Image: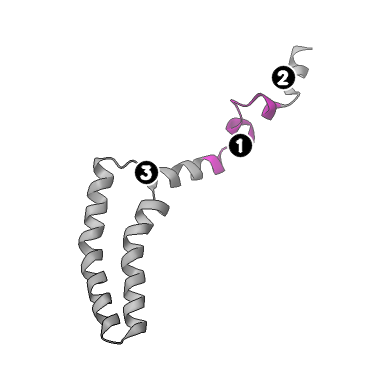
Amino acid sequence: MRLGLVDMIGLAASLVFALPLANYAVIRLVAGEVALGAGLLVVAVAMVVLPQYFLDPARILRRLLSGLLPRQVRGANDPEANGSEGDSVEK
């Protein structure tokens, strides 16, 4: 995955908040509080992973627009998507 400048800044901002939380989670795990430590560790990982892989604004926008467009417009570049409509116009 190639990251641009804005993506790198976003990743750095996520890590600024996720790393201290992960550190605290590891300390709680070592202290014997397994539920709290594991829960906080999951939250710290989610703070970094979710924005990078699942909440990509460009990907969300493309899925939204492709879902809103009619099937004929989505498949405009695909000759099989139009079917026999082109044949009836020529006759």
Given contact means CB atoms under 8 Å apart, are the residues at marks 3 and 1 in contact? no
Residue type, label 3: Met
> Helix or strand or loop: what does disc 3 sit on?
loop
What residue would you read off at disc 1? 70
Q: Magenta stretch containing residue 41, yes or no?
A: no
* Residue depicted at x 24% and y 59%: 15
Q: Nearer the viewer, residue 34 or 66?
A: 34
89 is higher (above) or lower (below) than 33: above
Indicate which disc residue 86 carries.
2
- Between discs 2 and 3, the one toward the N terminus: 3
* Extreme-front residue of the structure: 30
> Helix or strand or loop: what does disc 1 sit on?
loop
What residue would you read off at disc 3? 1
* Residue 60: percent from left, percent from top: 44, 47
Q: Is residue 83 left or right of residue 78?
A: right
Given contact means CB atoms under 8 Å apart, are the residues at marks 2 and 3 in contact? no
Discs 2/3, front: 3
- Between discs 1 and 2, the one toward the N terminus: 1
Q: Quick one: label 2, few (<14), some, or many (20+) residues within 10 Å?
A: few
Q: Magenta stretch containing residue 74, yes or no?
A: yes
* Residue depicted at x 32% and y 62%: 47
* Residue depicted at x 61% and y 31%: 75
Residue type, label 1: Pro
In which quarter of the view is residue 91 placed? top right
Q: What range is drawn magenta here?
A: 66-82
* Residue 69: percent from left, percent from top: 56, 38
